Image: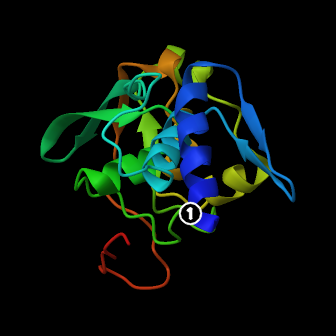
Amino acid sequence: MFISKFARLGAKACMGLSKAPVTIQSSNSSFPIVRNGYLESLSSKLFSSAASGNSQGECEEIQKISVTFLDKDGEREIKVPVGMSMLEAAHQNDIELEGACEGSLACSTCHVIVMDVEQYNKLEDPTDEENDMLDLAFGLTETSRLGCQVIAKPELDGLRLALPAATRNFAVDGYKPKPH
């Protein structure tokens, strides 16, 4: 019974990806499906069934944007799923963006510099908490942001982010934690 509910949920989630947010009602609870490229990919993996396809066709391809990271070694372009933070994208692509607090907005080690002011203006305004952490960042600029707070969205396609020459990790000097 438990598995069959999740199999039905996965099929409904897959069909609803191209529509507005979906709420699936059950006799005892409801499961909101948030329309977000990163969560959509997780929901299609978490709620997949053994069947190779479904009657409605396969889930749509996850939309990705192009992001270029610039560091002391040059530049590297990667594809980032819509809805994913730049910190997560950097970790998945072995880019040395520290993120000591693992994206919990408790440090400034994922500090990035948006290279284009027009792209910077397309970002959500930083919260007070992010501004407090940015005050601790090494090499702060007018277009500095925390990588954990920059979320990929279609209008950011072509985003260019520079990594500062150093970070201020007060916990351990010189240690580079591996992402989980």
Seen in the picture, residue 55 relative to 95 is either above or below; the reply is above
Q: Residue 32 versus residue 54: which sits nearer the camera? A: 54
Q: Residue 5 versus residue 158: which sits nearer the camera? A: 5
Residue 138: x and y in percent read 46, 57
Position of the N terminus, as image quadrant, is bottom right
The amino acid sitting under disc 1 is Ile
Tell me if mark 1 has few (under 14), some (14-19) or many (20+) residues whose alpha carbon lies within 10 angstroms of its own: few
Left or right, residue 93 beside residue 81: left
Position of the C terminus, as image quadrant, is bottom left
Left or right, residue 110 beside residue 79: right
**Which residue shows up at 44% across the image and 64% down it?**
99
Res 107 visible: yes
Residue 75: x and y in percent read 18, 35
Residue 179: x and y in percent read 35, 69
For label 1, the residue is 3
Element at badge 1? helix
Res 141 visible: no
Q: Residue 33 versus residue 160: which sits nearer the camera? A: 33
Left or right, residue 76 beside residue 9: left
Q: Report which quarter residue 28 is drawn in.
A: bottom right
Q: Work out which residue is located at the far left of the displayed protein and give it.
A: 73
Seen in the picture, residue 51 relative to 106 is either above or below; the reply is above
**Which residue shows up at 53% across the image and 71% down it?**
101
Q: Report which quarter residue 35 is drawn in.
A: top right
Residue 116: x and y in percent read 43, 20
Q: Work out which residue is located at the far front of the displayed protein and give it.
A: 1
Seen in the picture, residue 3 relative to 148 is either above or below; the reply is below
